[in-house]
Amino acid sequence: MTSKLTITREQLTNWVSQLDSDGGCDATDRQLEALIRQSLATMDSEPVAYIDKQWMLVYYVPPMSLGLKIGDNLYRQGQPARDSCAIADIIAERQRQQSVEGFSTEQDDTYVGCQLAAAAICYIEPMEAMSYWPADWHDDSFKPTNERRNLVKAAALIIAEIERIDRKSNGRTE
């Protein structure tokens, strides 16, 4: 049974310095075993996608069958696990709003008076939804769930508002 060890970049750099200075390092056998296994896994890895002649990303295997979701990054070698995937979740939510819900940038550009930001406020503080939810939006489009999911939706709406402002000012940020 293999246990997962966390080996930091700082440790690796320190071990290389030790090896350079006196030919030895203070890595334990278990740490060295973990590094060897990781190196072998990297050497055995198969490509997951390629770029075709139209510069489109084509997957060898459907991404969902690999456990991938919208917003996931693809790397050639294994990468350290992230402590939080909050930013990836926000990006995935923004993409979901566009691809699943059908909210295009053209539609976002029709919202004036900070409607997107007001909708974000509703997800940040659902008890205030009656005060802030845009009047001309369908009441059933406000779908609060749990605290984290609400904040992800709010952040994606704020990004949509910032993108709308940027487009309105022709790329200049305010």
Image: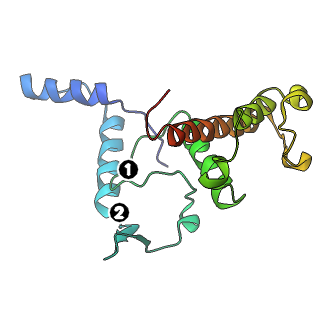
Residue at 14% from the left image edge and 24% from the top image edge: 17
Tell which of 13 and 69 is nearer to you. Answer: 69
Q: What crowding class fits label 2: few (fewer than 14 Cα within 10 Å), some (14-19), or many (20 or more)? A: few
Q: Are marks 2 and 1 in contact (CB under 8 Å)?
A: yes
Q: Position of residue 145 (x, y in %)?
A: 83, 40
Q: Is residue 13 left or right of residue 138?
A: left
- Tag 1: residue type? Gly
Mark earlier in primary sequence (2, 1): 2
Q: Work out whether residue 105 or residue 57 is closer to the camera in this orientation and state it.
A: 105
Q: What is the quadrant of residue 51 in the picture?
A: bottom left
Relative placement, left or right, of 114 versus 137 is left
Q: Secondary structure at mark 2?
A: loop
Report the side of 105 relative to 134 (left or right).
left
Disc 1 element: loop
Instruction: Say which of 169 and 24 sits in front.
Output: 169
For the residues labelled 2 and 1, the Cα–Cα distance comes to: 9 Å
Could you classify mark 1 by the number of other residues whose Cα lies within 10 Å: few (under 14), some (14-19), or many (20 or more)? few
Q: Position of residue 76 (x, y in %)?
A: 33, 56
Tell me which residue sits at (8%, 27%) in the image.
20
Residue 24: give its label: none
| Residue 78: assigned label | 1
- Residue that numbered label 2 is attached to: 45
Which of the pair 156/61 is nearer the observer?
156
Q: For the residue marked with disc 2, what is the amino acid?
A: Ser
Query: What's the image's color scheme?
Result: rainbow
Give residue 14's quadrant in the image: top left
Q: Position of residue 131 (x, y in %)?
A: 89, 27
Q: Give percent across and percent down for residue 133.
A: 84, 35
Horizontal arrangement in the rendering, residue 125 relative to residue 52 (left or right): right
Name which residue lies at 59% across and 38% down: 159
